[in-house]
Image: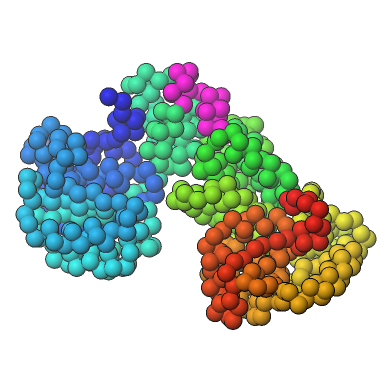
Amino acid sequence: MYRALYRKWRPATFDDVVGQPQVTDILKYQVAENRVSHAYLFCGSRGTGKTSCAKILAKAVNCLHPKNGNPCNECEACRSIDAGVATDVIEMDAASNNGVDNVRDMKEEIVFTPADLKYRVYIIDEVHMMSGSAFNALLKTLEEPPAYVLFILATTELNKLPATIVSRCQRFDFRRLSSDGIVAHLNKIAKSEGIDLTDAGARIIARMSLGGMRDAISLLELCAGTNETVNEELVTRVLGVGGGELPGQIVDAAADRDYPTLYRLLSDVVNSAQDLTVFFTELISYTRDLVVVKTLGDGAAAYLDLSDASFRSLSERAKRIPLGRLLYQSRLLEETLEILRRSSGDRRATAELALTRLAEPRLSTSPEALLARVEELEKQVALLRTGASVPQPAVKKPAPDVSYSPAPVPAKETPKEEKKPTPAEKPAETPAPETKEEITEKKNDKTDDKTDADESKQVPKWSLILDEFGRIKPSLGPFMRGSVATVSGEVVTVTLTVGMFLALVDGDETAKTVLLSLLSEHGTAASSIRFVSGAQKKNNDGQIEF
Ligand SMILES: [Zn+2]
């Protein structure tokens, strides 16, 4: 029977677990000395061995012939747990259902002694995903569990757990594995499985797995499926990682606010069927390397697994990009990766939204984004002091409409630009700065509007509604800034300032539901919402907005 490589290589004893001695040594000792606690909390990022250790612990406490705290893996108890048929070992994934029912069942069955084993073990994965009422039920059972019950809770997000739960458990922190640790283990697996793996190939896989062994083994298996030598060239081809070129291009395009290139690169990724999570993982890893180079300079080489050529190109890029922007980028990408892993929705739209925000720190109010903006301004002030003109980012825009931003419109070369007035954030109702032509067009628009004024009218309190919307959907709020809303019958039409934002906002059904309820709260009864872009409204010639 075929078994996925990571299952086959899942550690069977505490001694097999790679790189977590701070956890496994203590657990082994506790089992050997019969000093097992009644509730454990395993914290740490994906693939660091939390679930594996939970399984090993479940076997170890029930094993008929434990060896030095490790399970024997041969007795009846060990084998029934390994085969998943032991009714006394119950695994729950709080991420797949919110766990209330499971916890209720648990409360009822907990009074009965285990059927076959010494301990009844409850393993609850991603425990932070449980609902409030499930937590309360769990808390009650954690308060005074019978001696034959053992709880093992696992989480990737400790901060989301109520303190009352954390304080009742013995806590263990699982570390991300070092690159060297992963490479060594991959080599061991490759040797045993007859996979021809080169050191360079193993290093790229280790980088891509961000310290998680399970991901690393899965990636190795993916590459080994081709039956070729797993070297640098094969890994970059199979995983679709550009050998460091693609992340660099994305970072450059974002810094230049070069939207056509950004969207083309993303489109290439999507069309090549490369997994978007792999793509974002690569971007995160690359951004981290940039931060290390930025802060340590030449001394960074010792901390990075890079060839000399890659290191030189990384250093060049790091000089060009301010630290604040890199920190903003790093945080934004991590958040996006998390969304992509959890969401089953439109992944491409999520990715596009993220890249747009990457290019526009001004759309975010996070401290990192503000820092990036301050750095940009400082640079411009310094340039102005020297009497030089402020260079504009080489923004390549497909339509003039895209140039919405509080900064002057860079695509249009006018002498006025050199003064570089950078207005602060506009109040919600104020449209973005416009060129003369646009203002004239706007005026024409307004006269047009007046002719059908009997049909559609402005939505009252729209700026208030936008403020509230921004609080509920902070990721979309910025794209709605400066928009205008009219109502005709039961249809509300929202005109966005930038055509490109249309695709990002329009696809989001929850955003529409939220808006409809806010509208009704503020006195506009509507049954549907449509989004249009300012430019689309102007020219009804079917020109597709970027
Ligand atoms: Zn055993």
User: Where is residue 272 drawn, in percent x and y?
Assistant: 59, 33
Please tell me in which quadrant of the rendered image residue 126 appears. Answer: bottom left
Quadrant of picture, ligand 1: top left
| Residue 521 visible in the snapshot | yes
User: Where is residue 80 drawn, in percent x and y?
Assistant: 14, 37
Residue at 81 percent across and 68 percent down: it is: 433
Residue at 27 percent across and 42 percent down: it is: 52
| Residue 197 visible in the snapshot | no
Residue at 70 percent across and 51 percent down: it is: 255
Image position of 216 with respect to 101: above or below: above
Image position of 317 with respect to 308: above or below: below
Image position of 85 with respect to 499: above or below: above
User: Where is residue 120 drawn, in percent x and y?
Assistant: 13, 51
Q: Is residue 289 left or right of residue 109?
A: right
Please tell me in which quadrant of the rendered image residue 407 appears. Answer: bottom right
**Membership of 240 in magenta stretch:** yes
Q: Is residue 284 left or right of residue 396?
A: left
Q: Which residues are magenta?
A: 223-241
Q: Nearer the viewer, residue 93 or 58?
A: 93
Residue at 60 percent across and 63 percent down: it is: 476
Q: How is the image coloured?
A: rainbow
Q: Nearer the viewer, residue 507 or 124?
A: 507
Q: Is residue 84 left or right of residue 287?
A: left
Quadrant containing the N terminus is top left
